[in-house]
Amino acid sequence: MAGDFDYEAHGGGYVLQRRPDPRIAAMVHAAFGDARTLLNVGAGAGSYEPDDRYVVAVEPSAAMRAQRPAGAVPAIDATAEALPFDDDAFDAALASITVHQWSDSAKGLAELRRVTRGPVVVLTFDGDALDTLWLADYVPELIAAERRRYPPIEVIAAAAGRTADVLPVPIPIDCVDGFTEAYYARPDMFLEPRVRAAQSGWGFVDEPAIARGVRRLRDDLASGAWDDRYGSLRTQPEFVGALRLIVGHR
């Protein structure tokens, strides 16, 4: 494995659940400014890659490279920590929900800054805000595991550039990118193994804890207890939780 999660064993079908949401994509793409060449590191199946710029993609997992759509550029087999490019080779760089999966995030971020002459754009989650989502009440082990994985926002921002903007990313109620917060208004989705399988954090939680949390959620949905506590979320247009966009400038 190149990172902390085995996508060779568990990455199959990922692309079916983790499609880029167009509203989040618009915010990410705006951060590139007028950059014409873009490096996408930890590119996976191509989420949030723009199609109107010259893109070079880096992805160490063969399973994820195989899921890139036909229209996407093939991804280079390399890691963030050892990018095979010259200094200042690209106008901009993207790391989309991937920094927490790198074996050495500090080294990877330094490499990203090294090869980029313009903005370094990082889409990630703030570990300190993960418990904003109600799921923390059902599977606190998931939140604890995820919090250990995510580098602190201030550390990412400092590595991304001499100055950096840290922007909360609103998540729409019908978000099509299946990360955990995408289902803030659709609790029944967490009952689906296929949904959880496309969220790497569950892989760091033991099966009894998952079974216990899912069983309690199922019972609370059936009894109406979930709706008594959180039902207003079902019609809340957006949720501002832990998702952050960091834009580093030289």
Image: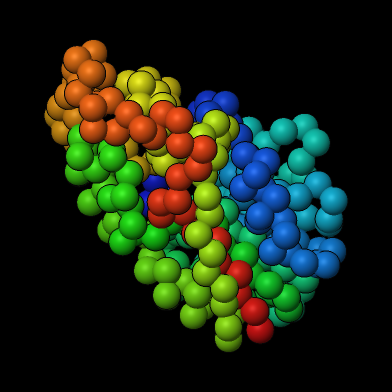
- Location of the C terminus by quadrant is bottom right
| Numbered circles on residues, count | 0
Asked if one can make out residue 223 in the rendered structure from this viewpoint, the answer is: yes
- Residue at (20, 44) in percent of width and height: 141
- Residue at (19, 15) in percent of width and height: 223
Q: Image quadrant of residue 46?
A: top right
- Give the image's coloring scheme: rainbow
- Residue at (59, 44) in percent of width and height: 44
Q: Give the side of residue 107 with respect to residue 65, left or right.
A: left
Q: Give the side of residue 13 with respect to residue 144, left or right.
A: right
Q: Give the side of residue 44 with respect to residue 231, left or right.
A: right
Q: Nearer the viewer, residue 208 or 248?
A: 248
Q: Nearer the viewer, residue 66 or 137?
A: 137
Q: Nearer the viewer, residue 23 or 35?
A: 23
Can you give x and y, in whole percent of width and height, for residue 136 in the image? Answer: 24, 43
Q: Nearer the viewer, residue 235 or 29?
A: 235
Q: Image quadrant of residue 71?
A: top right
Q: Image quadrant of residue 110?
A: bottom right
Q: Give the side of residue 54 with respect to residue 196, left or right.
A: right
Can you give x and y, in whole percent of width and height, for residue 224 in the image? Answer: 23, 18
- Residue at (81, 47) in percent of width and height: 51
Which residue is at the far top?
222
Can you give x and y, in whole percent of width and height, for residue 195 in the image? Answer: 42, 27
Can you give x and y, in whole percent of width and height, for residue 104 in the image? Answer: 42, 67
Asked if one can make out residue 6 in the rendered structure from this viewpoint, the answer is: no
Seen in the picture, residue 1 relative to 172 is either above or below; the reply is below
Seen in the picture, residue 88 relative to 44 is either above or below; the reply is below
